[in-house]
Image: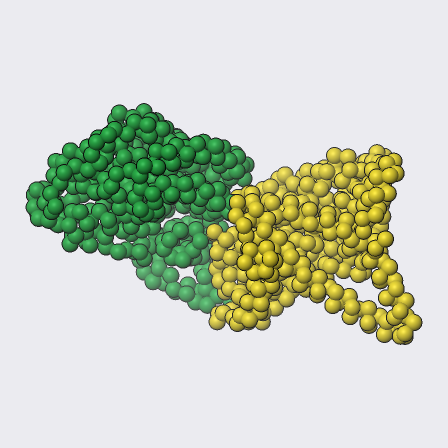
Amino acid sequence: MYTETQVIRNNTKVTVDGALDGTGEMVINVGPQHPATHGVLHLVITLNGETIQKIEPHLGYIHRSIEKMSESLSYRQFIYVTSRMDYLSSHINNHACAMTVEKGLQLEVPPRAQVIRVLMDELTRVASHELWWGAMAMDLGAFTPFFYAFREREAISDIMEETCGARLTMNYMVPGGVMADLHPNFQRRVKDFIKLFKAKIHEYDELVTGNIIFQNRMKGVGVLSAEDAVSFGCTGPVARASGVKSDIRKLYPYEIYDKLEFDEVTETAGDSFARYMVRMGEMHQSIRIIEQLIDNIPEGDFQAKTKAVLKLPKGEFYTRVETARGELGVYIVSEGGTTPYRIKYRSPGFSNLSALDHMARGSKLGDLMATMGTLDLVIPDIDR
Amino acid sequence: MFSLEGLTNSLQQWLNAHLNPTWVLVVESLIVILLAIALFAVLGLVLVLMERKVAAHMQIRLGPNRVGPQGIFQTSADTLKLIMKEGLTPDGSDKFLFNLAPFIVMIVAMLLLAPIPFARNFQIWDINIGVLFVSAVSSISVIGVLMAGWSSNNKYSLLGAMRSGAQIVSYELSAGLSIISIVVLTGSLRLSEIVASQQDGWWLFKGHIPAIIAFVIFIIAVTAETNRAPFDMAEAESELTAGFHTEYSGMKFALFFLAEYINIFIVCSVGATLFLGGWMPLHIGNWEGFNHIMDYIPSSIWFFGKVFFLIFLIMWFRWTFPRLRIDQLLNLEWKYLLPISMLNLLLITLMAIMGWHF
């Protein structure tokens, strides 16, 4: 019943007799609209039966040229665009940009602002991992975890809404500190959230982590060795699951991370289950950081005094931070004007996606969902 | 005491008094056909709503609650929408097979209603090979699924259909073996006799541990056979968008959807009939008073109560477990369930020969 179709093989267009040619291979398009890609990612997958032979990611469906746009925006304005990159880590994206500008201006951030920034970063990380947990379980066919995850994530969104005025694209970090002071309810609500989180986290393990079907789906699937993780440029939980110590908060501490007590969660197996366990562990570590800071927010200014119009000196500035997905680098080239000459973001999702083909080759189509789910891809972060 | 038996008997007498025997048969067939279709429609609506409510309860949300009180008319509204929708046939598809497939799946589900005893002496067709009929006819539905997958000319559909084929053919075996183990205990393939044999207790309790093992294997196997999560390989929403019915829309999709729920109802009623005594009330040994009270509950309530309990169990699985992978699915059947159920059948045979069961 299959009509002739054209496929691209070795960069040349060949006509194959139906979907099945002599090699027994079948090319299917997963995406740009597909339930498992969580966005407009397009994977051209060559299948042999159910076994994956090759994956070719096609990008660009949600490319908004954020980097080019930033060149015509001032140093105060361009930060807001970055909330739309990795929308689940929008605080951390803003943070990275604000830090780069501060580096250029050699601006000292008040201690209160530093603590607020770290608190917000860690809350964002927990929220992001919660959403990942639900979405990943849904990729594997379990729908209920999604609602469990949103129950706790909702509490964080409410906290954000109160202090920042937004639930997803917060735009709270500005060069020199944060935009507004904390809401009076902030401390109480964060403490309530910690209580809620600790009371409910065991449900996550009971529902998903300990499930035999889930473990069979995850263990030994999508293995990435430490060498490959480094050579693909993987960062964040993906690299740490392969045993690569890559936590920017530990390696190149920024703000007050060097004064905090927390562990870098690493695993050695490098499979989907290891990535899962790393993220679960990171949620606990983030809560640990929040607990240390929530009662010790210093008094003082929440923002340093800055000029109305910021001008960076001529030169190149680079900062790296640890987002929920890995290392985000912000690179600004300044000509000395009010707008950046060139901006480049090193986004974690792009490098992590590049390892997908290597990880998924030879596994079943069902395994792709486990691998892709634990890579925690956010497509606007990849395309920018 | 209310019973459906009296209703059918008086109807038969009335018809016999007024018509000649041939016409009686024709009228009775018509009534049965209409009843079957009505049951189909009602079950479809009730089960879909039940699924949504059960899912909502497990997912800490309310579920449908806008159309009618507690949302009970939601599924009716959905059905109306599906009927009004245009029935699309894709350009590259095999039009004949594409349009035939949903009907095959549906007809199979309808045929399976025939030998199920719904209440005391209330059964469409008390065929002497009832159990065999159920196992044989239920395997035909895979042909409809394969047809749908192949004729859609869609790669997702094809993958889904192939998975479904491998899955249903495999799980038929252990479902069959657990059914046979009850047949061994009863000594009859006739479903009414199987129910009658559970007068003094259900086979689940009378057959010691082997009967419980057979019951568990039966539930796992029929969950897989009806393509329900965690064995919903054929649909696998996150992998294959919608599997074998990706290209279907409107009423043709509704037929697949309805057939899925009717199939669940049927496998659960077979399970209830074989293991939980069908319409037979719960009787405990010599507790005369207790047994007497149980007899006062109409047999149809007993039957539907047990069936809906099993349906709830299957829905519970769906909203709890992640999906298996196709090779794990086949491993589970061929490496674990099949050997266990074969061994279990031997045990049950030994038990039946030695008369060790109650």
Measured as percent of width and height from the top left, residue A33 is found at 40, 58
Residue drawn at x 32%, y 24% is A261
> A175 or A42: which is nearer to us?
A175
Measured as percent of width and height from the top left, residue A220 is found at 46, 37
Residue drawn at x 24%, y 30% is A299
Instruction: Work out which quarter of the rendered image holds the C terminus of chain B and state it.
Output: top right
Q: Is A370 situated left or right of A354 in this image?
A: right
Measured as percent of width and height from the top left, residue B299 is found at 80, 51
> B106 or B27: which is nearer to us?
B27
Q: Do we see residue B94 in this rendering?
A: no
Q: Do we see residue B289 in this rendering?
A: yes
Measured as percent of width and height from the top left, residue B251 is found at 58, 67
> B335 or A16: which is nearer to us?
B335
Residue drawn at x 84%, y 46% is B295
Is B104 located above or below residue A259 in the figure?
below
- Chain identifier for the yellow-coloured part of the image: B
Q: Is B195 situated left or right of A209 in this image?
A: right
- Chain identifier for the green-coloured part of the image: A
Residue B164: image quadrant is: bottom right
Q: How many marks?
A: 0
